[in-house]
Amino acid sequence: MTPNHTFEDYVAEAVSVSVEGWDFSWLHGRATEQRPSWGYQRLIGRRLASVSAALDIHTGGGEVLAGVPKFPPTMVATESWPPNAALATARLHPRGVVVVATGDQPPLPFAAEAFDLVTSRHPITVWWNEIARVLRPGGSYFAQHPGPATVAELVTQILGPQPQLWARWEPHTQRAEAQAAGLQIVDMRMEKLRAEFFDIGAVVYFLRKLIWTVPDFTAEPYLARLRELHERIVADGRFVTHPTRVLIEARKPSVLGA
Ligand SMILES: C[S@@+](CC[C@H](N)C(=O)[O-])C[C@H]1O[C@@H](n2cnc3c(N)ncnc32)[C@H](O)[C@@H]1O
């Protein structure tokens, strides 16, 4: 696509491409997103190398997990969206990881205390009670969650402000939910990052791929809002929004009440 393309050209292209998997290379040159400074993949890599049995929840197409150098003897990943479960299996099976296709509701299909470590990056919902149940005493949950008001400028442009949705991901809400499930928070950090979109096709692709940003997004009902945004991007050269991320490490006490 070149700057001479019309709004209609950008939208038509962006609604026709596949959004399966968790590879964002289609956006190369059309959007950028800053990553948190803590380096999630490196941090899970370190932890996975030192446990016996681990579970990655909502593994997507397995892209992040596949970048880890060494897995524990038992490594399991769950995925609830069938196209991604197939992609994750193809990517992770050769590395000895079992991908379990689950439903999108609890329970997790594992016995209590099955894992030393549970990881998850960008889960859509967090089943705290299930995480606590499948962790052995002394085991840990290590995750990078979406933060509060993530990409708020973009959501506001399309839907208006969503305070209720944003409150769910507040660190204090996450902390309270983890504690209610019996987990102790060991570390919790938040970063506000910068993302830029250089054409409206990139915005449409992003909203189709991150389907929970504007729930059940399709371009058609939002064409007027998208056209406004297109005009802003043409005038300013870019649209800037701010993803937020929360790093969480939580521990299941070794002894009840400890
Ligand atoms: C944000 S993705 C994160 C995937 C992976 N953990 C990562 O960080 O790369 C979270 C979940 O959303 C699911 N998902 C992605 N697109 C979806 C869609 N169109 N409909 C339903 N679920 C979808 C993924 O398959 C995954 O389980």
Image: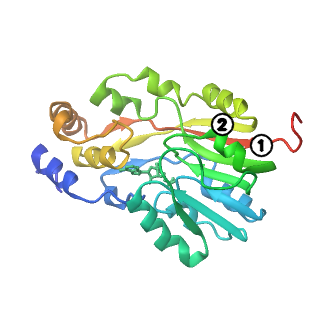
Is residue 229 depicted above or below 82 in this figure? above
Q: Which mark is residue 192?
A: none
According to the image, label 2 marks what residue?
A: 189
Determine the residue positioned at 39% across, 23% down.
162
Q: Position of residue 205 (x, y in %)?
A: 28, 49
Image quarter in which the C terminus is found: top right
Q: Which amino acid does label 1 sit on?
A: Arg
Callout 1: SS:
strand
Colour logic: rainbow
The quadrant where residue 20 appears: bottom left
In this view of the protein, which residue sits in the foreground, 239 or 77?
A: 77
Q: Can residue 6 be seen in this view?
A: no
Image quarter in which the N terminus is found: bottom left
Determine the residue positioned at 36% across, 61% down.
25
Callout 2: SS:
strand
Question: How crowded is the residue under tag 2: few (<14 C-alpha within 10 Å), some, or many (20+)?
Answer: few
Discs 1/2, front: 1
Q: Where is residue 115 in the image (x, y as percent from the top left)?
A: 73, 56
Question: How crowded is the residue under tag 1: few (<14 C-alpha within 10 Å), some, or many (20+)?
Answer: many
Mark 1 or 2, nearer chain start:
2
The quadrant where residue 114 appears: bottom right
Q: Which residue lies furthest to the bottom in this view?
A: 94
Specify whether tag 2 is near ligand 1 (CB below 8 Å). Answer: no
Q: Where is residue 195 in the image (x, y as percent from the top left)?
A: 41, 42
Is residue 135 depicted above or below 49 in this figure? above
Is residue 79 depicted above or below 163 in this figure? below
Q: Which amino acid does label 2 sit on?
A: Arg
Determine the residue positioned at 41% across, 35% down.
151
Q: In this view, does 125 lie to the left or right of 252?
A: left
In this view of the protein, which residue sits in the foreground, 37 or 129?
A: 129
Q: Distance between the residues labelled 1 and 2?
A: 16 Å
Q: Which mark is residue 251?
A: 1
